[in-house]
Image (spheres, rainbow, N blue to C red):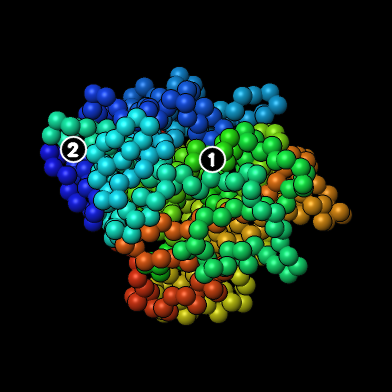
Amino acid sequence: MKNALGEAGPLRTAEGLNWSSVLGKAYAVSFGKSALRGERFGLFTSSGFRFATGRCTDCPVPEAALWYFRDELIAVPDGLRPITGTALFEPERNELPHPPLVWIGAPETVEHATLSEDGRFIRAPAGEIAFAVTPAIPTNRAYLDHATVAFLAKRPLRMRGVTLSHRGAPVFVARTIWPEDTRIDIAGARFEPLKERETLTTLIRAQTGGVTGTFAAWVLWERHLGQPRRWAGRPVLAFVLDGAQGDDDGAHGGHLAPATGILGPQGEWSDWLAANFYPIDDKNAKGILSAMVPMDNYLADLNSGQAWYRPNYMLVAVMRDSRIPRRVQAALQQVLHGYYCHVIGYDRASNNSTALVIDPLRWLGWHIPDTGPTGYLAAAAAFPVAALIQMSLSGGRDVFRMLAAEKTRLVPREAFEAIGHDLLDLVERSVPTRKLTSFERMLAADTEAVLFVRIPQIPSDRRFGTYPAGSLTELAGRVPWSRNEWETAPDPGEQPFPERLQGSCR
């Protein structure tokens, strides 16, 4: 950190901070605890990991994966060999392999902290300390402001960051700020199943997408209705749907991420592990990287966290056994390994982020119903129009391929709703003639409850978003026909995968 703190509205920023080198520059006494002590990464305990960066030379991780995290702090399996693209996971015989890496971002965590009204200090069980935040990355056009401080100062906070020295005194620099009042109220969550003719679309669109509402979680289905809920410590399988951004016409479709973990004793879920798939060889304006990432970072990293950009929605299946989450976690790790190694490629129309989520579920035997393409006739009609609008034949072909693609592999909200409705059908046994696979039988038998969670956007100087478009037709109705008139995030460019790493994974 430079010998000066910059300003981001009312908050001080640690200018010049490089998170990959903070371990060697930390203050003599850490204000927070180690991010690897007494923590979880989803289904895994943090004790099985160690700190590293992508420049590590002795990590049990393919160099192809490390390359993307050259300037980031990560957690890697401590002496363990992670799952490979060819390894077969046999859940009844094998221990769940560790992921190739977890993008943790910062070496310390602080819990039960409160922010002073001026944003200059935090107080926690360990005491009081000067406070600063990581700076906005150059392509992040909006950042924290007075509304952010007012919002955060009203609630207990969990943070990821590092204790550094500034003019001889300690200062805690936060990279992630997670509101602790987003816990799931296990005993108090209301039971409110979908009404007749009500769908998940209804819940997603309610309150203008819930963008400025309060955090809420309610139960759509539970096995032991009226009995005490013994969900604490139970494994979960979750799906997070991110909404539409208010300042980016290229982000009205939202994003989908699966997660696994353990529901905390007080309903905590900040340590669940999300699988975040983004275009791997394109830089991201918010600094997002494809990785297994703790949920607090996924939603609340100050630059890349989804909740700073848009409202979010989550489906949670509370399970009596970990066998389903373990299978899903292992499958996602295999996909991520292949993604890093370029055995699996990204294609906007045929293998985008949504396909990378729903395909592994179907491979496992969960036959989530597909909903067909947007329409071949519509695709054919749109081809010349899109080509003229985008002034490129390749652009028209891209739109044609997207319109012809099966929608649950293309549109995040379509996949989210298909997953949710099929899960409810399975647990309610509403399709008695359906022949279930062994995976579906386990899923139906193990699910104790299904919850819907609404996560509002955190206030900042970014415009508020709304719910994501549920189809390409709806998406087209939200944006100008001419791509030149779109409001989009800055293009940070590509990050070409080194030729020397092609075929380097074994």
Q: Write the residue at 59% across / 28% down.
A: 96
Residue 360, horizontal then vertical, whole percent: 61, 45
Q: Write the residue at 50% across / 33% down.
A: 41
- 74 with respect to 234 (left or right): left
Marks 1/2 in contact by CB < 8 Å: the verdict is no
Specify the label residue 268 is tagged with. 1
Q: Looking at the rendering, in which quadrant would you find the N terminus?
A: top left
Asked if 60 appears above or below 300 in the picture, the reply is: above
Specify the label residue 321 is tagged with. none
Of 118 and 273, the residue lying toward us: 118
Of 145 and 467, the residue lying toward us: 145
Asked if 423 appears above or below 83 in the picture, the reply is: below
Of 474 and 201, the residue lying toward us: 201
- Mark 2: which secondary structure? loop
Asked if 335 appears above or below 48 in the picture, the reply is: below
- 368 with respect to 260 (left or right): right
- Mark 1: which secondary structure? loop
Visible residue check, residue 28: yes
Visible residue check, residue 250: no
Residue 309, horizontal then vertical, whole percent: 40, 59
Asked if 355 appears above or below 18 in the picture, the reply is: below
Query: For the residues carrying marks 1 and 2, which lies nearer the camera in this image?
Result: 1
Residue 46, horizontal then vertical, whole percent: 47, 27
Q: Residue furthest right?
A: 433
* Residue kind at label 2, given as amino acid type: Met
Residue 482, horizontal then vertical, whole percent: 39, 78
First-in-chain label (1 vs 2): 2
* Residue kind at label 1, given as amino acid type: Glu
Q: Write the residue at 31% across / 62% down.
A: 461
Mark 2 sits on what residue? 1
Q: Write the residue at 79% across / 52% down.
A: 428
Of 72 and 496, the residue lying toward us: 72
